[in-house]
Image (spheres, rainbow, N blue to C red):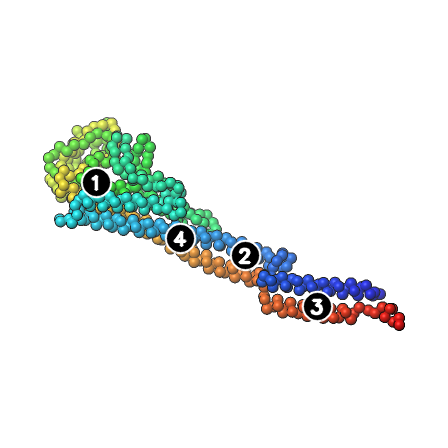
Amino acid sequence: MRVSTNMLSFNFMISLNKNLGRQNKIQQQLSDGKALHRPSDDPVKTIRSLRFNINLKENEQYTQHVKDSISWMETTDGAMSDLSSLTIRAKELVIKAVSPNPDMALDAIANELDGIINQMIEIGNTKIGDRYVFAGQNDKIQPFQRRTVTAADGTQTEAVVYSGDTNKISMRIQPGIVTPAQDSVNLTGEDVFGFQTTMENGKEIQTAQVLNNLIRVKEALKGQTSAKSNPAGGDISQTSAEAHNAFTLRIDEVNAGLPTKVSYSIDGGVTWETSGGTPPNPKIAIDGTGKVTINDSEGLGTATVEYQLTADTDNKSGDTYSLPQTESDRDLQWLSKTGLYLVDSAHSHILQAQTEMGARMAMYTQAQALLEKNNVVITGDVSANEDLDIAKAIIDFKTSESIYRAALSVGAKLMPPSLVDFMR
């Protein structure tokens, strides 16, 4: 095979360019510390790099969701702690009111309790950013408003109306199906204050039971307790002369508008004594005219109490009457029993909701620790797959540079002499 001068020059230049290409690739890698710049650098590592980076971005987004969730729950927990402190103060006030020698006037206690109710409503309207934390998913509208509610029978009562919904808010923190019932980050108005359904203008509205009960206690302190709770039917009147402790009377059965079965409670509706039975209940009876007789000297503070219920087509099962005492000392007995029970129930309800939130916060805190650990692991995998071995790259670059210089030196001597070199 004949080797010409042009072939020698051409092959030399190809080898020289390959060497320069290797130097350029190593120099580019050294400039940013990355071994991969294009899929052709290493197809296998490129695929692994894509997978690792997708996992890293997902994990970072889940981590951000967890941080947002914990921020929401910490705001909620702080509000719940404030509500718990206020209910404790409300209980202290009621205990003062029923003590033998109260150090505050009942009106002053009632005014302070009224202020506590307003504070609790304000806390119920707590916001994080522009979102109300206790409004469910309807979190752009102020959830709690204290106003007068007019029932179907025209009876007006003061209540705290809830305008939010009962839907939970969940933030995805892991792949899979979201289960709001288990991993929700919020408490709704129902969770915090409970619900009472009331009819207004033919429409059902939800009111805050805990706050409504505190309003009842406040009204009892001011001597403003109303005889009717929620009935739209006939009237009730006391036919016996004796004063008695406060109690609640409930209609259980109605026949042609006339109540035929009733119950009464002296503890705010926790336990009930019901008429009828076999043998008949000795504590309560109702005759064919709607006359109710109660014999409970221990519970009512008197031997016999009689009330007359009137027939009315609007009478229905479940109607209740709150029957207060006729003397101020009897009002204090209601406060010492039912009033304290209502305040205790309010505190227990709030504590239960706060405990549930605390359990969920612990779960999210553990999830945050796991996600941050995964972040470190995935970042290490990305680094091991993409990062350049600097020491090896520098050695390779120096080696390539030395080879390039040697090639230039050899190339200068390699150029063959021509006929002109011998024409002297």
Identify whether 369 is placed above or below 232.
Answer: below
Q: Nearer the viewer, residue 252 or 280?
A: 252
Q: At numbered mark 2, what does the secondary structure look like: helix, strand or loop?
A: helix
Can residue 126 be seen here? yes
Labels 4, 2: front one: 4
Q: At numbered mark 3, what does the secondary structure look like: helix, strand or loop?
A: helix
Neighbours of disc 3 within 10 Å: few (<14), some (14-19), many (20+):
some
Q: CA distance from mark 1 to mark 4?
A: 39 Å
Q: Residue at x 68, y 62 (%)?
A: 21
Q: Amino acid at mark 4?
A: Ile
Neighbours of disc 2 within 10 Å: few (<14), some (14-19), many (20+):
some
Labels 3, 4: front one: 3
Neighbours of disc 1 within 10 Å: few (<14), some (14-19), many (20+):
some
Q: Position of residue 350 (x, y in %)?
A: 30, 48
Q: Which residue is mark 3?
A: 404
Q: Residue at x 48, y 52 (%)?
A: 61
Identify whether 374 is placed above or below 405.
Answer: above
| Left or right relative to 223: residue 1 | right
Label number found at residue 52: 2
Q: At numbered mark 4, what does the secondary structure look like: helix, strand or loop?
A: helix
Q: Position of residue 389 (x, y in %)?
A: 58, 66
Q: CA distance from mark 1 to mark 3?
A: 98 Å
Q: Position of residue 352 (x, y in %)?
A: 31, 49
Q: Amino acid at mark 1?
A: Glu
Q: Which residue is mark 4?
A: 70
The quarter of the picture where residue 206 lies is top left
The quarter of the picture where residue 131 lies is top left
Labels 3, 2: front one: 3
Asked if marks 1 and 3 touch (Cβ < 8 Å), the reply is no
In which quadrant will I find the N terminus? Answer: bottom right
Q: Which residue is mark 1?
A: 219
Q: Nearer the viewer, residue 402 or 166?
A: 402
